[in-house]
Image (cartoon, rainbow, N blue to C red):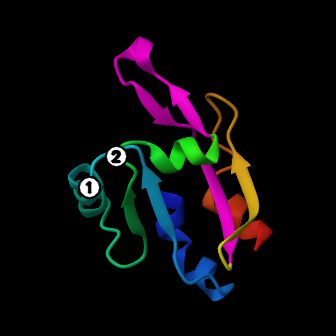
C-alpha cells in the first residue's frame, strides 16, 4: 500500500483512472485499513469478503493451517477496458512483482 500511495500521482499520470486494493476482508476492515493508511481518494479499497473474485481469478491461497481460511495471493494487475493486460503474481514470501514501482515500469 505505501508504494501505491507514494506513486499514485505518477501512476495516474500514465493514464490510470483508478488504483484499487482488493483483499479477502470485510468492508469494515478495508475501510479501517484505508483510513489508517490515509488513502483518501488515491486508492479505492475493495472488499472481497467471500473470496469470490479471488476464486474467479484463480489466486486463492489456503491459509487454514494458520486459522485464516481462504485468502488471496499477493498480486498486482493492469486492467484496460475490462481486460487484464498484465498480471504480476508474487512467489510465496516475495515482494517484488506486485510493487507499485514494478507496475509503474509496465505502464
- The answer to which image quadrant residue 44 occupies is bottom left
Residue named by callout 1: 27
- Identify the element where label 1 is drawn: helix
**Can you see residue 64?**
yes
Residue named by callout 2: 49
Look at the image and give the residue range highlighted in magenta.
Answer: 59-80
- Identify the element where label 2 is drawn: loop
* Residue 51 position within the rendered picture, expressed as x and y whole percent measured from the top left: 44, 42
Which residue shows up at 75% across the image and 74% down it? 107
Q: Nearer the viewer, residue 23 or 104?
A: 23
User: What numbered label is drawn on residue 69?
Assistant: none
Badge 1 local density, few (<14 within 10 Å), some, or many (20+)? some
Which residue shows up at 53% across the image and 45% down it? 54
**Can you see residue 1?**
no
* Residue 42 position within the rendered picture, expressed as x and y whole percent measured from the top left: 42, 76
Which residue shows up at 53% across the image and 75% down it? 8
* Residue 69 position within the rendered picture, expressed as x and y whole percent measured from the top left: 39, 24
- In three-dimensional space, the C-alpha distance between marks 1 and 2, rounded to whole angstroms, equals 7 Å
Badge 2 local density, few (<14 within 10 Å), some, or many (20+)? some
Task: Answer above or below: position of 50 versus 27.
Answer: above
- The answer to which image quadrant residue 105 occupies is bottom right
Q: Do the residues labelled 1 and 2 touch (CB within 8 Å)?
A: yes
Residue found at the far top of this picture: 65
Which residue shows up at 61% across the image and 40% down it? 59
Amino acid at each position: 500500500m505505501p508504494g501505491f500511495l507514494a506513486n499514485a500521482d505518477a501512476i495516474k499520470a500514465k493514464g490510470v483512472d483508478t488504483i484499487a486494493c482488493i483483499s479477502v476482508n470485510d468492508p469494515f476492515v478495508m475501510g479501517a485499513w484505508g483510513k489508517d493508511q490515509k488513502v483518501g481518494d488515491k486508492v479505492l479499497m475493495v472488499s472481497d469478503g467471500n473470496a469470490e473474485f479471488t476464486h474467479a481469478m484463480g489466486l486463492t491461497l489456503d491459509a487454514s493451517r494458520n486459522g485464516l481460511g481462504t485468502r488471496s495471493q499477493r498480486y498486482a494487475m493492469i486492467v484496460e477496458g475490462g481486460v487484464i493486460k498484465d498480471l504480476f503474481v508474487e512467489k510465496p514470501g516475495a515482494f517484488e512483482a506486485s510493487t507499485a514501482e514494478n507496475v509503474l515500469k509496465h505502464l
